[in-house]
Image (cartoon, grey):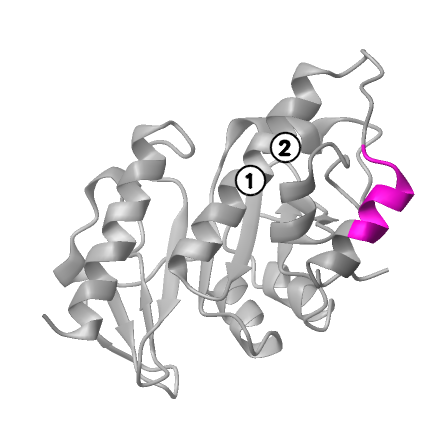
Amino acid sequence: MSAEKRLREQICLLAKSMFDRGLTGGSTGNISARTGDGGLLVSPTGTSFGRLDPARLSRFDPQGALIDGDLPTKEMPLHSAFYDTRSTAGAVVHLHSCHAVALSLMPDANADDFLPRLTPYAIMKLGRVKLLPFFLPGDPAMGDAVRGLAGKRSAVMLANHGPVVAGKDVEAACNATEELEDTARLAMMTRGMSPRGLSDADVERLVTTFNVEWDS
């Protein structure tokens, strides 16, 4: 089996796993990954994570031209912005996960540090998460907003919409996205209960020990 065929199957397998566990529903969400030649495989527009076809993924060449498969997601500006500004990005995942969206609706949501510091793994896998304002789905301005971060964040939260996370490969991006949703779920479960979060010293030790990319 070729490396690209394995990647196609991995994308569809991970997408279905997230769909089956309710992390994104219907035809929501999109996913992309770098190919060995520097091109991209992208989930097509209007498709369900539960029923992606490896053979019909949108295939882009290294110059960004669509060369095979169905038409790509309308959220391509988001994906392109991460790849263009983060040299380490090997995959990008965008979900409509409910708890993350719910947390973005809260009036006290922190735009510069969206996730409360509740667990070590959110910090280790995501660093600081930027909360971006609401945009219409497919608006190229979303990509412009990501580009405006100059590659300093691996994850953003689109208000009233969903998270977008870049990782070194498709498995890492999916794992980090799930960590974001889990942390948002914890935040909503404990909201109003004054939970004991990690201290600044705890965060500093995590950042230093695990070489976390921590934009301050």
Residue type at the position of mark 1: Glu
Which structural element holds mark 2?
A: helix
Dot 2: few (<14), some (14–19), or many (≥20) neighbours within 10 Å? many
Work out whether 159 lies above or below 52.
Answer: above
Q: Which residue type carries mark 2?
A: Thr
Residue bearing mark 1: 179
Q: In this rendered view, identify the residue nearer to me: 206 or 163.
A: 206
Q: In the image, what residue occupies the spot 62% across and 60% down?
A: 154
Q: In this view, does 196 lie to the left or right of 171?
A: right
Q: Look at the image and tell me whether residue 70 can be seen.
A: no
**Residue linked to disc 2:** 183
Magenta includes 203? yes
**17 displayed left or right of 107:** left
Q: What segment is highlighted magenta in the picture?
A: 198-205
Placement of 173 over or under 103, stated as above or below: below
Measured as percent of width and height from the top left, residue 56 is found at 16, 60
Whether tag 1 and tag 2 are in contact, CB under 8 A, the answer is: yes
Quadrant in the picture for residue 146: bottom right
Please give the name of the residue rendered at 39% of the width and 88% of the height, measured from the top-left corner. 63
Which part of the image, by quadrant, shows the C terminus? Answer: bottom right
Residue 160 falls inside the magenta stretch: no
Q: In this view, does 19 lie above or below 168?
A: above
